[in-house]
Each structure stands twice: as structure tokens, then as C-alpha cells.
Amino acid sequence: MTQGMQSSRAVMILPSPPDGVLDGSRHLYAVRVYYEDTDLSGITYHANYLRWFERARSDLLRLLAIDQRAAIEAGEGAWAVAEVNLKYIKPARLDDDIVITTTCTELGAASCRMHQVANRLGSAGPEPLCEARLRVGFISLEGRPRRQPAKWQAAFAKFMNSEG
């Protein structure tokens, strides 16, 4: 290897996966509509909204220092979607920039209710495309509801009560 190649490797910057950002009591997570997300007409396939919403929720948990993997590996339990209601408003199209906004609307001992909206970003401001209302519960590894860890409940309570 030449000296120049070694130098370029030493300073190579690697990208990180997106985490989104906390904006008070909202989590904002950006996605882009790629060809693989669409059908032949260039419109986003309906199930992709579920994937985008799941990614946004997972990254929200990471930002709240909630370690799902550690809880599973320790046998404590896991998060599971108990209910979801989607309302499709307008289609997302190839190359659209989308921001998923997530809020926690209700917090219980074993579950929380969340609201998520996929908004297209445009010159006229955010345009709602799809909305989800859901309940996510903490369950044992056998699938039974259980109280979420106190640390997790405190993180959600702090997030819910944050100001923008």
C-alpha cells in the first residue's frame, strides 16, 4: 500500500444510521421513498408505512436509553405492538422526503399509547400522508403482559412531559 492510501484510511469517516432527533415531546425521524418502497406506479406500498413507523419507534427507544436487546437477552421481556390503526391520507411517491413524528399519548404500567404521522416535506410545509394510533406493550418472553422496567417508564414520562 502507498502512504497516501494509508492516510486516506486513517481519516475515513463512516456514516451512522439515522437516530432521528428529540424535539421536546416529539421524536422526528427522516426517511426517503426509494424505488424498493414503491409499486410500479411510483406510489409507496401501504405496508412500508408500518416499517417506517417501527424504525422511528425503535430509534426513539434508543434515544431514551431504553435497551431492547439487553432486556431480551436478560430474559426481562420485549416490546410488542398490541393494537395499530392506520389512516392513509395521501400517497408517498418515489423520492419524497418524509418525516415520521412520534408522540407518546398515554403511559401505563405495562403499555403506552403512541401517535405517529408520516409527513411529506415540501415547500408548502409538512403534508400528512399516513397516521398511526397504536398501543405498544411490554411482554414476557412467553408472551404475557408484564410491567415495563421502572427506568423505561421514567424515560417515557420524561419524554411525554418535555417542552419543545
Image: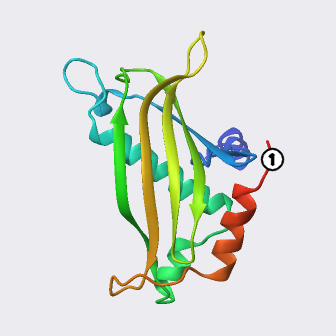
The residue drawn where x is 34% and y is 23% is 91
Q: Please tell me whether residue 101 is drawn above or below residue 59 in the rendered image.
A: above
Give 148 or 69, whichever is nearer the viewer. Answer: 148
Q: Which image quarter: residue 140?
A: bottom left
Give 131 or 22, whichever is nearer the viewer. Answer: 131
The residue drawn where x is 36% and y is 20% is 93
Q: Given the image, on which type of amino acid does mark 1 rest? A: Glu
Horizontal side, residue 32 vs residue 24: left or right: left
The residue drawn where x is 35% and y is 42% is 86
Q: Residue 102 appears at what percent x and percent y?
A: 57, 46
Disc 1 designates what residue?
163
Q: Please tell me whether residue 136 is drawn above or below residue 9 in the rendered image.
A: below
What secondary structure is marked by label 1? loop
Horizontal side, residue 21 vs residue 70: left or right: right
Residue lying furthest right: 163
Horizontal side, residue 9 vs residue 117: left or right: right
Residue lying furthest left: 40
The residue drawn where x is 52% and y is 54% is 114
Residue lying furthest top: 123
Q: Residue 55 appears at what percent x and percent y?
A: 47, 51
Q: Residues within 10 Å of mark 1 (few under 14, many from 20)?
A: few
Q: Which image quarter: residue 12?
A: top right
Quarter the C terminus occupies: top right
Q: Please tell me whether residue 162 is drawn above or below residue 137 in the rendered image.
A: above
